[in-house]
Image (tube, grey):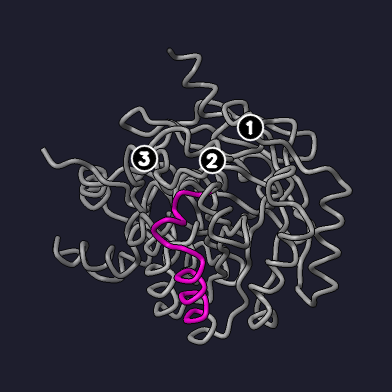
């Protein structure tokens, strides 16, 4: 028996091709797309302008529900963290954040992560598998359905691909996801309202540049020299800073789009003035298209070797970068009262299950 796939994993072109292969007229694809992303139905039976045979055929081959909500936690600041169970029993997290500019959703791209950053809760479990494009899209749909049920007026306006996993280690499914949510006849989430974060897979950064998408790129840097970055992020052994920066230069030349460098501040590890000056030197020749996002560390129980930098050190680091002409800011924290760090809710549930 054919394994059902999520219909959310099909681009409009793929949906059209599948329908025509079944002998169904091409214009039905636009109708189905409208039911999925504009009317946002939860059952194929609700697609009332399709005949019964077409609805049954869709239900036979596709699913509209591969994610099950297990837990929903709401912060006092309005942040909502969802714990979803996949059809194979694996758990993932998705986070809805409220900002002055709109509603942003942080999506997960893998079950577990093989990058192995020493400060990150998401990497506590090695990668089990990649998510399909449909499973990534459905995270957005689940959040949007939640908003629809609340008052019907709010819409997901921004996306950050920064949840569990390395998006560029699941490249094709991530690209499919981006094209589906950006489709102007569907969710129509603007490419410039979407940010993909990578730990620094240099070859994939170049490939992403060649896509010529308007999607924003963020690179997790976290250290300005190889010795320190390798200590914090084992990925640096495969893609040391020189190789990473060569890929960044390619991206900047190809796209002329600003890139964000994420820098998590770890007390007495990478938060000294010395590292700030090294970082400013590293980015000097690309500062016109660079932005450094300084991130106060959220302690993770399993990574107790790190502490959050003191406020004085954070301010000092920030001011050193500014003085050197580097555009930068300190990330506003969201949902600190509901285990905001990626992977914390999931790992707690796994502990309970043991």
Q: Nearer the viewer, residue 336 or 205?
A: 205
Vertical order, 233 against 14 (above or below): above
Q: CA distance from mark 3 to mark 1?
A: 23 Å
Residue drawn at the location 52% of the way across and 32% of the way down: 83
Residue drawn at the location 83% of the way across and 70% of the way down: 322
Of pointers 3 and 1, the one earlier in the residue sequence? 3
* Residue 323: image location, x then y, percent: 85, 73
Of pointers 1 and 2, the one earlier in the residue sequence? 2
Q: Can residue 202 be seen by looking at this rendering? A: yes
Quadrant for residue 335, please give it. Answer: top right
* Residue 223: image location, x then y, percent: 62, 57
* Residue 252: image location, x then y, percent: 54, 82
According to the picture, the residue beneath numbered tag 1 turns out to be: 305
Q: Secondary structure at mark 2?
A: loop
* Residue 26 left/right relative to 327: left
In front: label 3 or label 1: 1
According to the picture, the residue beneath numbered tag 3 turns out to be: 127
For label 1, count other residues whose C-alpha is less than 10 Å away and answer few (under 14), some (14-19) or many (20+). Answer: few
Residue drawn at the location 45% of the way across and 80% of the way down: 212
Vertical order, 208 against 255 (above or below): above
* Residue 348: image location, x then y, percent: 55, 22
Q: CA distance from mark 2 to mark 3?
A: 15 Å
* Residue 80 left/right relative to 245: right
Q: Magenta stretch: residue 96 in it?
A: no
Q: Secondary structure at mark 1?
A: loop
According to the picture, the residue beneath numbered tag 2 turns out to be: 118
The magenta segment: 233-251
């Amino acid at each position: 028996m054919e394994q059902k796939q999520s219909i959310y994993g099909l681009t409009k072109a793929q949906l059209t091709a599948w329908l025509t292969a079944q002998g169904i007229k091409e214009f039905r694809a636009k109708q189905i797309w409208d039911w999925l992303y504009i009317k946002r139905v939860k059952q194929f039976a609700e697609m009332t302008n399709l005949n019964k045979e077409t609805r049954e055929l869709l239900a036979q081959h596709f699913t509209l529900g591969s994610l099950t909500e297990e837990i929903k936690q709401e912060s006092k600041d309005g942040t909502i963290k969802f714990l979803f169970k996949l059809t194979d029993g694996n758990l993932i997290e998705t986070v809805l954040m409220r900002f002055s500019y709109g509603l942003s959703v942080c999506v997960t791209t893998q079950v577990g992560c093989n990058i192995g950053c020493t400060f990150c809760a998401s990497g506590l479990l090695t990668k089990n598998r990649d998510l399909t494009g449909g499973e990534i899209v459905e995270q957005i749909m689940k959040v949007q359905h939640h908003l629809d049920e609340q008052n019907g007026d709010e819409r997901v306006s921004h996306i950050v691909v920064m949840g569990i996993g390395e998006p560029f280690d699941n490249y094709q499914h991530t690209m499919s996801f981006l094209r589906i949510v950006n489709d102007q006849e569907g969710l129509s989430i603007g490419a410039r309202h979407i940010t993909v974060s990578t730990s620094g897979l240099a070859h994939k950064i170049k490939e992403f540049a060649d896509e010529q998408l308007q999607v924003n790129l963020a690179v997790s840097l976290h250290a300005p020299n190889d010795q320190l970055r390798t200590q914090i992020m084992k990925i640096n052994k495969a893609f040391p800073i020189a190789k990473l920066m060569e890929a960044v230069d390619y991206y900047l030349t190809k796209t002329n789009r600003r890139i964000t460098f994420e820098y998590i501040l770890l007390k007495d590890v990478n938060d000294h003035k010395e590292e700030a000056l090294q970082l400013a030197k590293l980015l000097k020749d690309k500062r016109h298209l660079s932005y450094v996002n300084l991130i106060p560390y959220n302690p993770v129980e399993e990574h107790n070797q790190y502490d959050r930098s003191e406020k004085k050190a954070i301010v000092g680091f920030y001011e050193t970068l500014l003085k050197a002409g580097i555009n930068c800011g300190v990330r506003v924290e969201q949902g600190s009262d509901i285990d905001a760090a990626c992977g914390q809710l999931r790992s707690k549930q796994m502990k309970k299950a043991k």
